[in-house]
Amino acid sequence: MKMHLILLGLILSLPLLAVDRKPLTKEESAKVIEAAIRKAAKKPTGELTKADLEKVTELDLRYKQLTSVTGLGKLTQLTFLDLRGNQLTNVKGLEKLTKLERLVLMYNPDLTKAQMAELKKALPKCKISSSPMK
């Protein structure tokens, strides 16, 4: 029972742990995104081809302190994307992900209602989860 309580406390504190980390630059964000794509495509090195990118249908980028989504727009087969707990200020490029069924954007405090409305309009079939926005 005590171990369960410790694990629950750790899980609930994850969003708080991310607050202490410094937001990544656009370039650092791109490197983190590429590493996640490589892992999902099972291609650690070499050029990422269109065929490699099409293998990626799900991507988990939670709590990475990302400030940019550059590079995600080329994942044309993506159906699930988790970007919760980052430092995103805009989501330009995600509208290209027309096969998305689920997008999680909670805990990105700088995203606005207008940005979310635009994204929801561009991706009407996608279920988008977000926190209350500015």
Image (cartoon, rainbow, N blue to C red):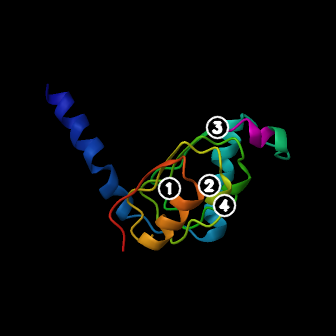
The picture places residue 22, in percent across and down from the top left corner, at 46, 68
Task: Tell me which residue sits at (62%, 58%) in the image.
Answer: 94
Looking at the image, is mark 1 or mark 4 earlier in the sequence? 4
* Secondary element at tag 3: loop
Distance Cα–Cα, label 1 vs label 4? 11 Å
Q: Position of residue 76 (x, y in %)?
A: 72, 46
Q: CA distance from mark 2 to mark 3?
A: 17 Å
Q: CA distance from mark 2 to mark 1?
A: 8 Å
Q: Is residue 88 visible?
A: no
Q: Which residue is mark 3?
A: 57
Sequence-earlier tag: 2 or 1: 2
Residue occupying image coordinates x 38% and y 58%: 18
Q: CA distance from mark 1 to mark 3?
A: 19 Å
Q: Nearer the viewer, mark 2 or mark 3?
A: 3
Q: Are marks 1 and 4 in contact (CB under 8 Å)?
A: no
Residue 32, which numbered label?
A: 2
Residue type at the position of mark 4? Ala
Q: Is disc 4 in contact with disc 2, using a CB cutoff of under 8 Å? A: yes
Which structural element holds mark 1?
loop
Which image quadrant for residue 43?
Answer: top right
Which residue bears the numbered disc 4? 30
